[in-house]
Amino acid sequence: MQYEGTVIRPPSEWNSIILQVTVGCSHNRCTFCGAYRDKQFRIKKQAEIEQDLEFAAQYCRRQRTVFLADGDALVIPHQRMVLLFKAIRQQLPWMRRISLYANCRDILARTTEQLAQLKELGLGRIYMGLESGHDPTLAAVKKGANAAEMIKAGQRVRRAGIFLSVTCLLGLGGRQHSLAHAAATAELLCAMQPSQIAILTLMILNNTELAARQQSGGFIMPDQKELFTELRTLVAGLEGIRAQFQANHASNYFSLDGRLPRDKNKFLAIIDRACSGEMLLKTENQRAL
Ligand code: SF4
């Protein structure tokens, strides 16, 4: 397979064939994200993708899922995407699921019918970086979408019958908006009804605009206790939602993993133990992105 630069995939795609169909992220403006800073965005040429598909057809016969990299593969124009999905089905007929990262703009650029067409062709899962449901926070980090657009995009994916996994980022509102960010994110998730919620904790990377803001005093990271209170506010606000809930990413100080609504009280009890200092937490050195 011909990969350009570091290729990032969701943890649950560890056993997937990673087919890099785009390079970088077409948005590439989020102030906290350093993932694709060194990559000039482009959609890969058909011939390059076909070569990788031929390689996968020969050497990846044990894998059953495909993940389309990089940061927002859904940016590929619809008709070209349909042809790509058909090519995957033809070359790798044993595939059970195709997944990709998509941002709000690229989801809203498609109709429910177009998403349903991709679902028919194998698109089983979309990973969407929500980060926050709080409009001032979304604007401050230059996410490129507001809460109402995020809800619309998420609901469209669910209406098309596609599994929707969304990530939320603790700490992103800074100390100033910590609790408002948590409460608005919970409210948005209740309206959106994703299939899976994944919680990460902000780690400020040196190569980002957010690091510069922090150094100039324009952004203050909540401390550990404030982050746990933020998480508690978010979980407490998740009412009437049926979803997988994971806060077991390497960036978090402790793990939560289960289903809502079943495990909500268990989650709250664990967070309370973390708040009161009764739990063994990861050290800063043990955290990672
Ligand atoms: S967070 Fe997502 S949309 Fe924003 S720059 Fe990074 S990859 Fe692109």
Image: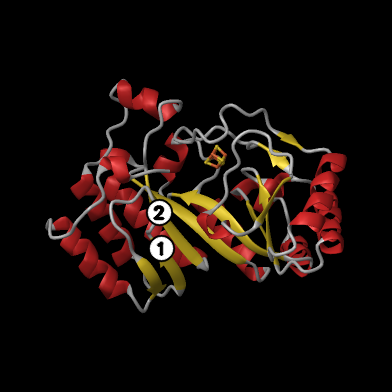
Depth check, front residue: 39 or 16? 16
> How many numbered circles are shown?
2
Residue drawn at (83%, 38%) of the image:
45
97 sits left or right of 178 in the view: right
Q: Secondary structure at mark 2?
A: loop
Neighbour tally class for label 2: few under 14, some 14-19, many 20 plus, Cα within 10 Å? some
Q: Whole-Å distance between the Cαs marked 1 and 2?
A: 8 Å
Residue 190 placement (x, y as % from top left): 44, 66
Q: Quadrant of ligand 1?
A: top right
Figure quadrant of the C terminus: top left
- Asked if disc 2 is less than 8 Å from ligand 1, the answer is no
User: Is residue 206 in view?
Assistant: yes
Figure quadrant of the N terminus: top right
Residue drawn at (58%, 58%) of the image:
13
62 sits left or right of 168 in the view: right
Res 246 label:
1
| Corner quadrant of residue 25 | top right
Q: Which residue is mark 2?
A: 249
Depth check, front residue: 58 or 68? 58
Q: Secondary structure at mark 1?
A: strand
Depth check, front residue: 76 or 62? 62
